[in-house]
């Protein structure tokens, strides 16, 4: 539908991670038959959303990996009491937890990507499970990265702050973790 369609109002803004977004308000919009993409657009739209969710999971894994790498580099560089922060066992454990979440999210993103050609019910179940897990892992990695960087982890000069904002927003695109967990629970109850 063209942006100039009568009855459509668009409000543009930026998300917390600086990405462009818009709210579309449709009031009395009428389109002719040539605007129809297919006779049954619902299936095509569902497949597109499934692909989008799988792609978002892969994208989040990349951002989580970068956050883990930058956090580890910071801990190796930053010194306290004459030794690198990375030598403190409690911080090593937190880094291990971050990497565990990252690797489990990577596995779930692979599951999502390899599920795209499955029958619809299986595809949607697996991708919902992946999106739910990746959303929780993304939030965990973002929070840990910021905490391990200390106050500077929140500054614009620190690259990890940008990844953290992006990871928090990831969970809200195409359904958040709660939405997908509810879908997975409903499917398990119905089985």
Image (tube, grey):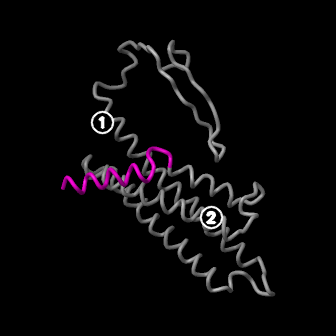
Q: In this view, does 165 lie above or below 68?
A: above
Residue 112: give x, y in percent of width and height. 38, 56
Q: For residue 159, what is the image quadrant?
A: bottom right
The quadrant of the rendering that contains the C terminus is: bottom left
79 relative to 139, above or below: below
Viewer-proximal residue, 20 or 15? 15
Query: In this picture, is 46 found above or below 79?
Result: above
Which one is in front in this view, the residue at disc 2 or the one at disc 1?
Answer: 2
- Identify the disc placed on residue 129: none
Where residue 20 sits: x, y (%)? 62, 37
Residue at x 64%, y 47% (from the top left corner): 17
What SS does tag 1 mark? Answer: helix
Residue 76, percent across and down? Answer: 72, 79
Q: In screen coordinates, is 188 left or right of 64?
A: left
The residue under the point 62% across, 57% down is 164
Which of the 4 image quadrants contains residue 82? bottom right
Q: How far apart in space, not on screen, are marks 2 and 1 (Cα)?
A: 36 Å
Residue that badge 1 annotates = 43
Q: Nearer the viewer, residue 3 or 171?
A: 171
Q: Nearer the viewer, residue 66 or 185?
A: 185
Image point (41%, 13%), residue name: 30
Residue 67: numbered disc? 2
Give the magenta range. 172-191
């Amino acid at each position: 539908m063209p942006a100039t369609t009568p009855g459509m109002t668009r409000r543009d803004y930026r998300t917390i991670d600086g990405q462009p977004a818009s709210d579309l308000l449709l009031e009395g919009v009428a389109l002719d038959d040539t605007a129809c993409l297919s006779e049954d657009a619902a299936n095509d739209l569902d497949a597109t959303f499934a692909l989008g969710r799988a792609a978002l999971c892969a994208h989040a894994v990349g951002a989580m990996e970068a956050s883990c790498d930058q956090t580890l580099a910071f801990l190796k560089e930053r010194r306290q009491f004459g030794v690198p922060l990375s030598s403190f066992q409690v911080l090593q454990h937190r880094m291990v937890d971050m990497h565990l979440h990252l690797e489990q999210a990577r596995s779930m993103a692979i599951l999502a990507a390899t599920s795209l050609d499955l029958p619809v019910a299986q595809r949607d179940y697996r991708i919902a499970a992946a999106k739910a897990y990746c959303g929780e892992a993304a939030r965990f990695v973002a929070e840990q990265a910021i905490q391990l960087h200390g106050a500077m982890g929140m500054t614009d000069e620190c690259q990890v702050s940008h990844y953290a904002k992006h990871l928090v927003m990831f969970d809200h695109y195409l359904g958040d973790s709660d939405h997908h967990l509810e879908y997975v629970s409903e499917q398990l109850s119905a089985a």
